[in-house]
Image (tube, grey):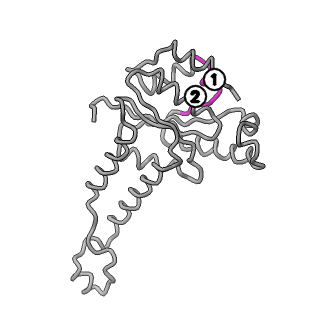
């Protein structure tokens, strides 16, 4: 691990410009590597980590087999896992998947049903984590974009997602940055995002301009 490693996750609602934002980080920021979606696979790793922590924290784990028998307790929780080994294995796996540069991360849209909370596990594993929470202001237009246009309850679902993202940001302002699709195309807002997340690694603004100029704003 590099001492100045920077990890940024793009956590987005659907059809909010996450691919554009991924391109901005991946192509315009020097010494960076940002992957696309992984179908929520990393969330599954974080759920595994969460459940191992829960298992280790079980109150019966502090006793020997004989002590459990003496207490007339079924020894289902006898003998505990080594949490440090679990942590290093998960860190190693995630780094092996994504950390191909000093600044790295990925984008994902699968954060419905409370899944943004997995970011807390991710930050336990990688304390330097920063997250962009990406929404879209024009929900009406968003609901008619791409595959969302076939969902009859798209507007209601997107409204709920936006509230959820905003509430999560309010509780975690120390490592999240709330951004919107529309603000990606406003230079002062985009500049503020990069300065906040990567104060020592400014992007190549010519590349930024090229990406935004050739983006399909649907």
Is residue 11 depicted above or below 207 in this figure? below
Spatial CA distance of label 1 from label 2 is 7 Å
SS for tag 2? Answer: helix
Give x and y (percent) for residue 14.
Answer: 63, 40
Residue 181 lies left or right of residue 96; in this view the side is: right
Whether residue 174 can be seen here: no
> Is residue 164 located in the magenta-colored stretch of the structure?
no
- The residue nearer to you, when weighing 148 against 80, is 148
Circles 1 and 2, Cβ within 8 Å, touching? The answer is yes
Is residue 177 depicted above or below 110 in this figure? above
How crowded pointer 2 is (Cα within 10 Å; few <14, some 14-19, many 20+) is rated as some
Q: Residue at x 47, y 35 (%)?
A: 35
- The residue nearer to you, when weighing 44 against 127, is 44
Residue annotated with mark 1: 215
> Quarter of the image holding residue 65?
bottom left
Q: Residue at x 52, y 24 (%)?
A: 24
> Is residue 183 located in the magenta-colored stretch of the structure?
yes
Give x and y (percent) for residue 138.
Answer: 72, 32
Whether residue 159 can be seen here: yes
Q: Residue at x 36, y 66 (%)?
A: 55
SS for tag 1? Answer: loop
Residue annotated with mark 2: 20
Q: Earlier in the sequence, mark 1 or mark 2?
A: 2
How crowded pointer 1 is (Cα within 10 Å; few <14, some 14-19, many 20+) is rated as few
Residue 52 lies left or right of residue 162; in this view the side is: left
Give x and y (percent) for residue 166.
Answer: 59, 40
Q: Magenta stretch: give its range.
A: 178-187
Figure quadrant of the C terminus:
top right
Figure quadrant of the N terminus:
top left
Give x and y (percent) for residue 69.
Answer: 26, 85
């Amino acid at each position: 691990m590099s001492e100045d490693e920077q990890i940024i996750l793009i956590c987005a609602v659907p059809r909010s410009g996450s691919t554009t934002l991924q391109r901005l980080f991946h192509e315009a920021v020097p010494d960076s590597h940002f992957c696309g979606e992984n179908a929520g696979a990393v969330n599954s790793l974080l759920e595994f980590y969460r459940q191992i922590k829960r298992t280790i924290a079980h109150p019966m784990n502090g006793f020997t087999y004989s002590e459990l028998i003496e207490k007339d307790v079924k020894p289902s929780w006898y003998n505990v896992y080594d949490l440090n080994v679990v942590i290093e294995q998960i860190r190693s796996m995630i780094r092996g998947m994504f950390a191909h540069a000093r600044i790295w991360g990925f984008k994902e849209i699968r954060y419905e049903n409370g899944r943004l909370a997995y970011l807390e596990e991710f930050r336990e594993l990688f304390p330097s984590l920063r997250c962009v929470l990406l929404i879209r202001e024009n929900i009406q237009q968003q609901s008619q974009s791409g595959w969302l246009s076939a969902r009859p309850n798209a507007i209601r679902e997107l409204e709920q997602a936006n509230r959820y993202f905003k509430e999560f940001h309010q509780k975690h302002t120390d490592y999240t940055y709330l951004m919107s699709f529309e603000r990606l195309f406003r230079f002062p807002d985009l500049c503020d995002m990069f300065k906040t997340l990567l104060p020592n690694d400014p992007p190549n603004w010519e590349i930024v301009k090229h990406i935004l100029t050739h983006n399909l704003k649907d």
